[in-house]
Image (spheres, helix red, strand yellow):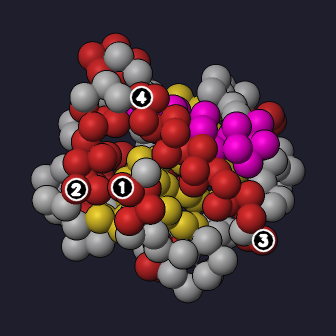
């Protein structure tokens, strides 16, 4: 309980000029963008993300998502979202890891914010190497054109909330948003558990 209470929350959810939103300015049209909390390299909150992502603690991702969902449910900017999509992993990576951490965070948000979850439409077409040690330009090159939609019409006239665990440069989320925004009258907002505030 103390850890949740001490979480370095961003309070970005109703601020359109926050640091996460600014990552997308001039790059891709995003309605709203937020992260629940900040973390710096080596902080205990980085450890929380690593525990979810690499140590198989998907239930921790679910619980964090529920708590973040409570915040989003109260935020005016996120009241008109129609559907939540977690950033998909390539099947090969998901098989190796055993689960998609973003999906479990999205499940928690969906549960507490009462927004439907969609897991079967957006997919990762190409297996890519990890983004961790790449520059901003290399990250963009690494994700360009890697996402696809099985049924684009499903998202016509819909406001989609893309969910991921951490945002650093925004390249992966930008690539997802770019694919969705090809669809007629589709809108995209973004929510990540953490913002890597280096």
Name the side, left or right, on which 38 lies relative to 177: left
SS category of the residue bearing label 2: helix
**In the image, which is nearer the foreground, mark 2 or mark 4?**
2
**Which residue is pictured at 38% across the width and 57% down the height?**
2
Locate residue 159: give its quadrant: bottom right
In the picture provided, is 72 more to the left or to the right than 129? right
Magenta stretch: helix, strand or loop mostly:
helix
Q: Which stretch is magenta? A: 101-116
Task: Measuring from the top left, give residue 135's x and y in whole percent.
Answer: 18, 62
> Is 79 in front, or is 26?
79
For residue 66, the mark is none
Report crowding for label 4: few under 14, some 14 to 19, many 20 or more residues within 10 A (C-alpha). many
Q: Does the magenta stretch include residue 102?
A: yes
Residue tagged 3: 76
Q: Mark 1 points at which residue?
A: 3
Q: Is mark 1 on a helix, strand or loop?
A: helix
Q: Label 2 vs label 4: CA separation?
A: 18 Å
Q: Position of residue 161 (x, y in %)?
A: 66, 51
- Per the image, the residue denoted by label 4 is 58
Asked if labels 2 and 1 touch by Cβ distance under 8 angstroms, the answer is yes
Q: Identify the mark nearer the N-term, 3 or 1.
A: 1
The residue at the point 45 percent across, 69 percent down is 9
7 or 135, nearer to the observer: 7
Q: Above or below — where is 95 with respect to 166?
A: above
Mark 1 neighbour density, 10 Å: few (under 14) some (14–19) many (20 or more): few
Q: Is residue 69 visible?
A: yes
Earlier residue among tags 1 and 2: 1
Q: Which of marks 1 and 2 is in front?
A: 1
User: Mark 3 near mark 2, Cβ–Cβ under 8 Å?
Assistant: no
Residue sticking out furthest to the front: 2
């Amino acid at each position: 309980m103390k850890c949740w209470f001490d979480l370095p929350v961003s309070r970005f959810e109703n601020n359109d000029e926050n640091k996460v939103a600014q990552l997308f300015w001039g790059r891709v049209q995003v309605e709203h963008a937020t992260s629940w909390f900040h973390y710096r390299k080596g902080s205990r909150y980085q450890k929380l993300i690593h525990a979810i992502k690499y140590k198989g603690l998907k239930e921790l991702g679910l619980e964090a998502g529920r708590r973040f969902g409570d915040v989003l449910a109260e935020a005016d900017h996120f009241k008109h979202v129609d559907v939540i999509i977690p950033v998909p992993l390539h099947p090969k990576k998901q098989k190796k890891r055993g689960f998609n951490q973003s999906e479990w965070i999205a499940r928690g948000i969906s549960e507490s914010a009462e927004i439907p979850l969609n897991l079967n439409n957006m997919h990762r077409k190409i297996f890519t190497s990890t983004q961790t040690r790449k520059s901003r330009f290399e990250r963009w090159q690494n994700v360009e054109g890697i996402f696809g939609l099985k049924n684009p019409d499903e998202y016509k006239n819909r406001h989609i909330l893309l969910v991921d665990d951490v945002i650093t440069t925004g390249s992966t989320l930008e690539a997802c948003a770019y694919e969705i925004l090809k669809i007629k009258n589709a809108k995209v907002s973004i929510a990540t558990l953490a913002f890597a505030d280096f």
